[in-house]
Amino acid sequence: MVVLKAKIIDIITGEKSIVLNEEDAKNLMLKLNDRVRLNRCDVSTTGICESIVCFTEITKTLVNPGEIGIYRDILKDFPIKDGENIEVNPAPTPLSVEYIKKKMKGKTLTKSEINQIIKDVVSYSLSQIEIAAFLMAEEYVGMNMDEIENLTRAIAENGNIIDFEEPVVDKHSIGGVPGNKVSLLIVPIVASAGLKIPKTSSRAITSPSGTADTMEVLAPVNFSAGELKRILKKTGGFIVWGGSLNIAPADDIFIRIEHVLSIDPLSQMLASIMAKKLAMNIKTLVLDIPVGRGAKVENFDEARKIANQFIELGNRLDIRVRCGITYGGQPVGHTVGPALEAKEALETLMGNGPKSLIEKSTALAGMLFEMTGLTTKGGGQDMAKEILRSGKAYQKMKEIIEAQGGNPNIKPDEIPLGDKRYVVVAPTDGYISSISNSAINAIARAAGAPIDKGAGVKLYAKMGYAVKKGDPIIEIYAERSTKLKEAIDLISRNPPFMIEGMLLEEVPGF
Amino acid sequence: MVVLKAKIIDIITGEKSIVLNEEDAKNLMLKLNDRVRLNRCDVSTTGICESIVCFTEITKTLVNPGEIGIYRDILKDFPIKDGENIEVNPAPTPLSVEYIKKKMKGKTLTKSEINQIIKDVVSYSLSQIEIAAFLMAEEYVGMNMDEIENLTRAIAENGNIIDFEEPVVDKHSIGGVPGNKVSLLIVPIVASAGLKIPKTSSRAITSPSGTADTMEVLAPVNFSAGELKRILKKTGGFIVWGGSLNIAPADDIFIRIEHVLSIDPLSQMLASIMAKKLAMNIKTLVLDIPVGRGAKVENFDEARKIANQFIELGNRLDIRVRCGITYGGQPVGHTVGPALEAKEALETLMGNGPKSLIEKSTALAGMLFEMTGLTTKGGGQDMAKEILRSGKAYQKMKEIIEAQGGNPNIKPDEIPLGDKRYVVVAPTDGYISSISNSAINAIARAAGAPIDKGAGVKLYAKMGYAVKKGDPIIEIYAERSTKLKEAIDLISRNPPFMIEGMLLEEVPGF
């Protein structure tokens, strides 16, 4: 053990690392990327001691012997001050590494082993490679329902729990379909009927807009747990970003690594979604499972299997779950991108929206009405449609926008959209035979979404529409001309739609 | 694209990362850990342009807008000077990421796909997580022999090739047994018979001593390819560290990550070993496969399967391979640790060594004599024993030590050993029923090996020896008392030997 003086290094690295002078590293017998445990005791004020495990980096000059370089990544969980004395010890490999290897070998993990893994994930004691190994083992080896239940409880319990002290319902989509702004309709419809629906949502990771990005066009989405309790009491519903609430924080770490690996193990998806519901004390949940080409789930049989697993897991966790298998083979509604989607949702609430968006939103909202006994089986969607038609849902959305600090009187046309635009027209007469989810996503992201809120894609035609040569099919919106150009460049490489009979390519070209 | 001024940051991080000011990152639309390509053109001298892909880290103050922070990790392959102008572009995800995902999904990879993966590994275009995903896919999905051949060729070709311009032979162990100093005997025996044996070896990663660490006790082991050619001409053999020759550099990167994951996919082991032989233009190879409890391979059937795969891969690569399946259930000889092993090897060359070490070394050397036609089938080991007995092998070793810059006249007793020592005695009469490879490794490492050359373990008794209560069984050597204490502490937690009839534990204790 040695005591070293902290020297803050103003870099965010993406890992929990510290920097030692090579002399100190040698004395501690630490090699590059070995683990160390840092201890600090706040003697002057609280007397509390904290500790954190980090990975070692080495310098000859940037940090002197007797000092320890601390990157900014560490300060959030371990608020060291510059010049503070820190105890530094070589740290053993955490126990959970053994459990990850056990899973890699195809064995079943116990409750306490799974809990230790999640504890070590959340405390950043595992390296990204070790977490990747755990996720790959889940993907290749799989988990049984006992393990999934234990994983779900561990993810929920190793994070904050929010108790709204009254029965709350929720709607969740497993994702994978562009333009899925249905939460902006479902939350006000459901809250209008007197149910409490505290909707936390995510920002886009690989898509052009997450529900939180879309709602943020209309109102702030970043609140503390206490503020959310007050808003829910007042309005019966909200649509906020879940990321700052420290609910199921392991999930955020897993999602980043799943994204790099392009995997989404079923056990992890079940546990991640249900852990967040457990932590929010949700008792009634409707789960949207979009199915179709280019969606996360490509066929009905698989969707049914997933649905049954969610229902079984829900039973074990005392959460009533019903799943809605919906069509996910093309974008929902006609818009993709934060501002475009917020505008379309608002228009729909005001009585002027596309049928597909209305049908999907009211079907899912209606399931919640039936599950909570507000109406009998089969009456839910009609009830939801009536709430939407009557304008009650729009009034409720204005209350929610106001409670979240936005302008409740905003008109759809006042929402700023990117003014750099480009229209792609039909190259021939015919019927639209496919719209590519992945190409639409890529074009909207290239145009600047979700960072540029006004960027995105508007669809003038969807599958099965009859079009004539020269008809507009999609319009690209961007805030910057460089981004518009990038999006246009993508179209030829990755066509976003097909027209039956369209010439795809001439070989050889000119 | 922007041009930024390089600012060297004196830290070794273990990853290829650069640091941008958050303003520049925002303008380039780069998020934490996104890929960037750096370009530099050496206009003043060679006019050559180079480029490298790195991962982005972010700072508010440590690097100003207009600057780019460069960690030391990058300088080896991309020797930027402080203040130099560097072109910086956001970089797309490398193509090989798609191929890794293809393998993860269980598909077979083509030659060009495998080559692209290795190219991107060597150029550090892949993150550690992506490389981990590739290795995990090899472990779980496996590779067929076509893929293994292509992987072997790709690893060899994406690195330096050394051609000694005459037929060269080699001996290699797949590893896993402590104290395996046989190369220090085999190389001089084989070279004494007129064969050319250019032995490159590795340093310890998880073991207490690699062959390179052991040889370094007697002579320097770090040479350029040109120096090795001259040494081989003169002596017919050498024992050096392969790490600085840039032979099969992908392998070094894979090994580091395999170590973190504790996996050793068979396809990767085959390709790694044979790629290095291909790059050294080895035409005749004896492969040592130790089998036994606590070795890498635990049973004969598995060892035979692995042997056949090496032989088939050798056929495809035009390398004649014979495998020797040897006993690996306890350490080879009586010593573990660099100086102790070098001493034991030297004593054996001088005519005073343990039988197990002599038998193993001469058996493997003899196989090379038979394969190259120096003797007929069955006569190899006798020929090797005669070379050893006659003192010719010792004379050859002196030549090799001298050619590598060491003292050829060193006596075994002049090799410095750790002077902090501790003897573990038999707690009871009986027969030694097991010696634990992993416990011996752990104790020797805790004692300071391989960093402290004089640290290690000496065995006074091995499996089957009859011992009396109080007889010395193992002696621990250390250079520092703190390390000796650590090693002693390990013994009770992880007993290195068992005596039949020994009381293991009293329950309940006092």
Image: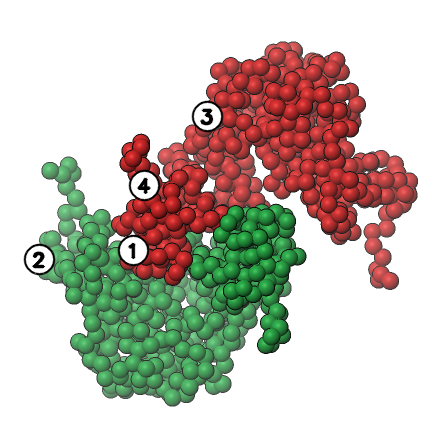
Chain colours: A red, B green
Q: Secondary structure at mark 1?
A: loop
Q: Which residue is mark 2?
A: B470
Q: Nearer the viewer, residue A125 or A292?
A: A125
Q: Position of residue B315 (x, y in %)?
A: 52, 73
Give the CA distance from mark 4 to mark 1: 18 Å
**Looking at numbered disc 4 in the image, what kind of residue is underneath it?**
Arg
Q: Quadrant of residue A395?
A: top right
Parent chain of label 1: A
**Looking at numbered disc 2 in the image, what kind of residue is underneath it?**
Gly
Q: Which residue is mark 1?
A: A28
Give the CA distance from mark 3 to mark 1: 40 Å
Q: Residue at x 25, y 57 (%)?
A: B446
Label whose residue precedes the other's in the sequence (3 or 1): 1
Q: Is residue A440 visible?
A: no
Q: Residue at x 91, y 43 (%)?
A: A469
Q: Position of residue B88 (x, y in %)?
A: 61, 58
Give the CA distance from mark 4 to mark 3: 27 Å
Q: Nearer the viewer, residue B155 or A79?
A: A79
Q: Residue A40, which numbered label? A: 4
Q: Are marks 2 and 3 on the same chain?
A: no
Q: Secondary structure at mark 2?
A: loop
Give the CA distance from mark 2 to mark 3: 60 Å
Q: In this image, A311 relative to A460: left or right?
A: left
Q: Residue at x 36, y 67 (%)?
A: B203
